[in-house]
Amino acid sequence: MTTSSHVMQVEPFGIEPIPDAERNASVLDFIRLQWGGANTLASAMLGAFPILFGLSFQQALLATLLGIIVGALILCPMGIFGPTTGTNNAVSSGAHFGVVGRIVGSFLSLLTAICFFSLSIWSAGDALVGAFCRIVGMQESPWLFALAYGLFALIVLVVCIYGFQFMLLVNKVAVVLASVVFLVGFVAYADKFDPAFAGAGMTTDSPEFWPLFIGATLIVMSNPISFGAFLGDWTRYLPRQTGKGKIMLASLIAQLCTLLPFVFGLVTMAAIAQYAPEYVESANYTGGLLAISPLWFFPLLMLLAVIGGLSTGTTALYGTGLDFSSVFPRLSRTQATILIGVLSIAIIFLGRFAFDLVASVTTLVTLIIVTTTPWMVVMTLGYLHRRGFYCQDDLQRFNRGQEGGIYWFYKGWNLRGMLAWIPSALVALLTVNIPGQFVGPWGELAGGLDISLLVALLLPAVLYPLLLKLSPEPAAVFGPAQAEPTAAAPRFANQLSPMPE
């Protein structure tokens, strides 16, 4: 249970395993954190992309449902590592990528955090400033936006410094308030929404339809997949005996709940396209939302902006600060959080005032999908292969500046996991095809269809078991009670370095 004393104390734990006595979170808390982190205007902004791509409302709704469901199914297993290892998913991945190779997970979490932290601050700041200026009759100006971005970013940074319990409290409140505002929002925009909205008038026979449909689905899918590197940040606070099926079901439920902001984004973007099409041309979702909003809804939009900036921002930034305290062991969790926070704030200002926002968002979320999905496949298959056995102490060796242990493999790298992930992520990236946004060199390989997700799922699912077959892992990684009776001599050096004195 979260107490006021815990909330107002800076979290004492870093990346080391959470003691059993401190694992007092519930599965409901886990659902709140996932749902709260996506129940915001940032998700509504992502939800607007299918309409921005020219799909009709029905086509966009189908792409959204497909993206959320498929993404959630890929995500679900990523919550089961935390209760077993007591640490986050990046550190847990050391069992399959090596205790040094786990920096792959750290890189992916950094990429994800910057993207979604930026999205949350941009959407929240734009909505807050826009609604405020319309209420008081002021002109929008760059310095007002900069002030809003900076204020939101600093508040999020403070919450993340306090840590897990404060973040949990924020999301408990955010889930309820944001859901109420979204439901009221459907009423506010109902008179401007036409469910028969035709978009660009494409049919399934149109040559440009399938590339755009798949591209829209991938952008929606980036939201559930973006949680992959972070679920362990929260499930490490679940009791060790929490059922694995219950954890996976909780992830599925939480992601299905995010349909609320995504459908809100679809409905309002369809209305914007009809009543304020100039905002569609400039891909300015927040501006269009304000342009067609009734005056009485402005205060609620401001409330939604504040809630969203805090909940999405904290869930994105907390995990990366936590993880980088292990990549750079001399930094405490608080110091690493401040460092990553300052870097992210700088990127927020550069991305908003110096670059094309839409192209940046599309490219980043595409990178998240094609690089994180193979990593998640390796993690899931590795869990099954190891029969759920993990040695908590050996996973922490890199964080302590030590060598050796059962996950040392070849100088800290498990070449099986790395040789499954690298080509899978690379080929998936090369086959991305989102017309007008990002097209990889092999983007036309399938006649213009984007097959990057298929590659990201299937290639590691073939490569990783093959590499495990060609070079069996040492018996020690299966645990004393589950060690394989025989293990052929590995082709990739498996000799364990001597334990440090």
Image: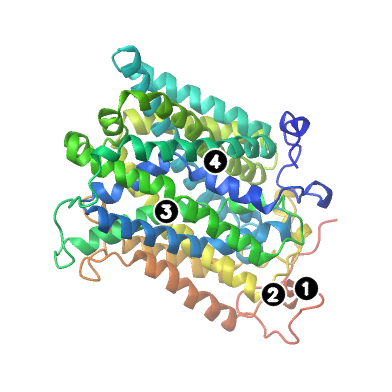
What whole-number distance in Å separates the C-alpha atoms at marks 3 and 4? 20 Å
Which quarter of the figure is the C terminus placed in?
A: bottom right
Secondary structure found at label 2: loop
Asked whether the residues under the numbered discs 2 and 4 touch, taking CB atoms below 8 Å apart as contact, a structural biologist would say no
What whole-number distance in Å separates the C-alpha atoms at marks 2 and 3? 29 Å
Q: Earlier in the sequence, mark 4 or mark 1?
A: 4
Q: Nearer the viewer, residue 481 or 394?
A: 481
Judged by depth in the image, the label closer to the viewer, 2 or 1, is 2
Task: Report which residue position mark 3 lands on.
Answer: 222
- Residue at x 61% of width, y 39% of height: 172
Task: Report which residue position mark 1 lands on.
Answer: 479
Is the residue marked by circle 3 packed among few (<14), some (14-19), or many (20+) residues within 10 Å?
Answer: many
Q: Which label number is shown at residue 175?
A: 4
Horizontal relation, residue 410 to residue 268: left or right? right
Q: Position of residue 198 (x, y in %)?
A: 17, 52
Asked whether the residues under the numbered discs 2 and 1 touch, taking CB atoms below 8 Å apart as contact, a structural biologist would say yes
Q: Earlier in the sequence, mark 2 or mark 4?
A: 4
Q: Earlier in the sequence, mark 3 or mark 4?
A: 4
Which quarter of the figure is the N terminus placed in?
A: top right
